[in-house]
Image: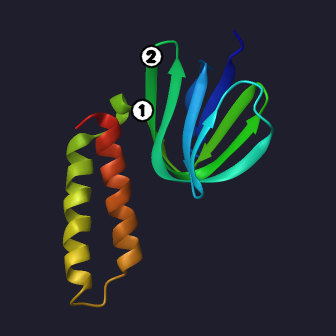
Amino acid sequence: MPTLHVNVVTPDGKVYEGDVDMVSVKTVEGELGILPRHIPLVAPLTVGAVRLKKGSTVDLVAVSGGFVEVRPDQVTILAEAAELPSDIDVERARSAKERAEKRLQQAKQENIDFKRAELSLRRATNRLDVAGR
């Protein structure tokens, strides 16, 4: 059975590389499942978990925006930030989530950037979800 070679790369370097049966990413237009021999495309990513399926195993990578480039036998994810579950500092993510929630509450009363606080909350929640906590 054919596979896809996947690279997940950030400005800091390579986060993941391997061959998988299927890749699932969250684009700004919605969820995208990619199988071998998929038509070439480039799509912008949003905050979400990249699911990398090989056999019965599914690996997750927390991604905070970027782009996915698809070729028939290769997928490259150029992410602003990406972390494997083992690399996620859960306490730091929880603290970030709490700070973002407080900012969102204050945004109703003060002059706080609501979209920025909302994005911070989405990133922290995604990291906690991928870490399994």
Residue located 25% across and 75% down the image: 104
Placement of the C terminus among the 4 image quadrants: top left
Picture layout, residue 126 above or below residue 115: above
Q: Label 2 crowding class (10 Å Cα cut-off): few <14, some 14-19, many 20+?
A: few
- Residue 50: x %, y % from top left: 50, 38
Residue located 21% across and 90% down the image: 109
Picture layout, residue 10 above or below residue 34: below
Please state which amino acid type lies under the numbered disc 1: Leu
Query: Judging from the image, what secondary structure is the residue with disc 2 in?
Result: strand
Residue located 30% across and 35% down the image: 131
Picture layout, residue 2 above or below residue 95: above
| Horizontal side, residue 91 vs residue 62: left or right | left
| Horizontal side, residue 123 vs residue 29: left or right | left
- CA gap between label 1 and label 2 equals 15 Å
- Residue 28: x %, y % from top left: 58, 58
The image quadrant that residue 21 belongs to is: top right
Which numbered disc covers residue 55?
none
Quickly name the residue at label 2: 57
Quickly name the residue at label 1: 84
Q: Foreground residue, 122 or 28?
A: 28
The image quadrant that residue 89 belongs to is: top left
Query: Judging from the image, what secondary structure is the residue with disc 1 in?
Result: loop
Please state which amino acid type lies under the numbered disc 2: Thr
- Residue 44: x %, y % from top left: 64, 55
- N-terminal of the two: label 1 or label 2? 2
1 and 2 marks in contact (CB < 8 Å): no
- Residue 93: x %, y % from top left: 27, 49
Q: Name the front one of labels 1 and 2.
A: 2
| Horizontal side, residue 9 vs residue 87: left or right | right
